[in-house]
Image: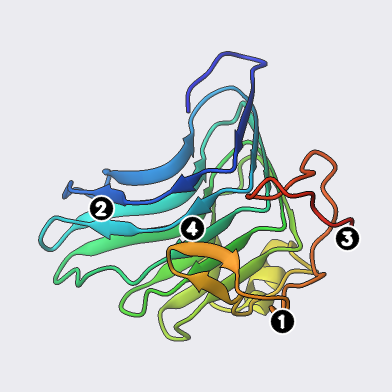
Amino acid sequence: VDVDTNAVINIDKNKISKVSSLTNAATFGNTAISIESFGTYNISNNMIYGFELTAANPVAFVRGLKNASASATLNLAFNSIYMNDLASIGTGAVTYQGLFITNGTNNLANNIVVSAEPDFASYCIYRDLALGTLSSNHNDFYPVNATNGNVGFFNTTATPTLLNWQTASSQDPNSLSVNPLFVASTDLHLLNTTTPLMGKGIAIPWVTTDFDGETRDSI
């Protein structure tokens, strides 16, 4: 997304799937939502899933959301990202990140990022370098695979567990790392009221309805 100074951009209630790349170079790939310029971005109630790479032995990146702009403010709330198990990458080298934050002002709450990739390193949240600011809490970062899945990456170090991430980043004191119980990998509604995330979020004044347009509970 590239807009003018002082613009306000609202991205709400979208399904974004088939986040695909056919390139074969480390500096190329695809991101579902990528912030590259000025403005305030209010991003809420989106479902992102269906990542894929189509080149043989791919060398590329795929990401759910990125903020790399020093001039951008990202307000991110109530979004769900499912990082599916990619087809075999052979001898390739893939960068796989749910949230990729490198700059700007970033406020994150009530988001769910699940990585189901078992074969190579993946990251629910990736905080590269020390530029910009990050305020993150009441999220669920869940890597399914304990060997290659990582809750996060902070500056220069992978953080496999939530405790590792909390210690390195000083963020997410009230966040969780649990299976949210999605309906399906292509339907990121929560399965039922027994989800461990029930009642674990916080009220966000600028988000009053959910993905289906129903009024959100006052948490």
Disc 3: which residue: 219
> Percent from the top left, x then y, of residue 52?
27, 58
Three-letter code for the amino acid on which mark 2 is drawn = Ala
Element on which disc 4 rests: strand
Q: Nearer the viewer, mark 1 or mark 2?
A: 1
> Percent from the top left, x then y, of residue 156?
51, 61
Q: Nearer the viewer, mark 3 or mark 4?
A: 3
Q: CA distance from mark 3 to mark 4?
A: 25 Å
Residue drawn where x is 79% and y is 63% of the image: 201
Q: Earlier in the sequence, mark 1 or mark 2?
A: 2
Three-letter code for the amino acid on which mark 3 is drawn = Ile
Q: CA distance from mark 2 to mark 3?
A: 40 Å
Disc 4: which residue: 98
Disc 1: which residue: 194
Q: Earlier in the sequence, mark 3 or mark 1?
A: 1
User: Where, by quadrant of the figure, is residue 56 drawn?
Assistant: bottom left
Scheme of colours in the image? rainbow
Residue drawn where x is 56% and y is 48% of the image: 46
Residue drawn where x is 33% and y is 72% of the image: 85
Front residue of this view, candidates 139 and 165: 139
Q: Earlier in the sequence, mark 4 or mark 1?
A: 4
Q: Is residue 152 left or right of residue 122?
A: right
Q: Earlier in the sequence, mark 3 or mark 4?
A: 4
Q: CA distance from mark 1 to mark 2?
A: 38 Å
Disc 2: which residue: 60
Three-letter code for the amino acid on which mark 1 is drawn = Thr
Q: Is residue 53 left or right of residue 70?
A: left
**Number of numbered discs overlaid on the protein picture:** 4
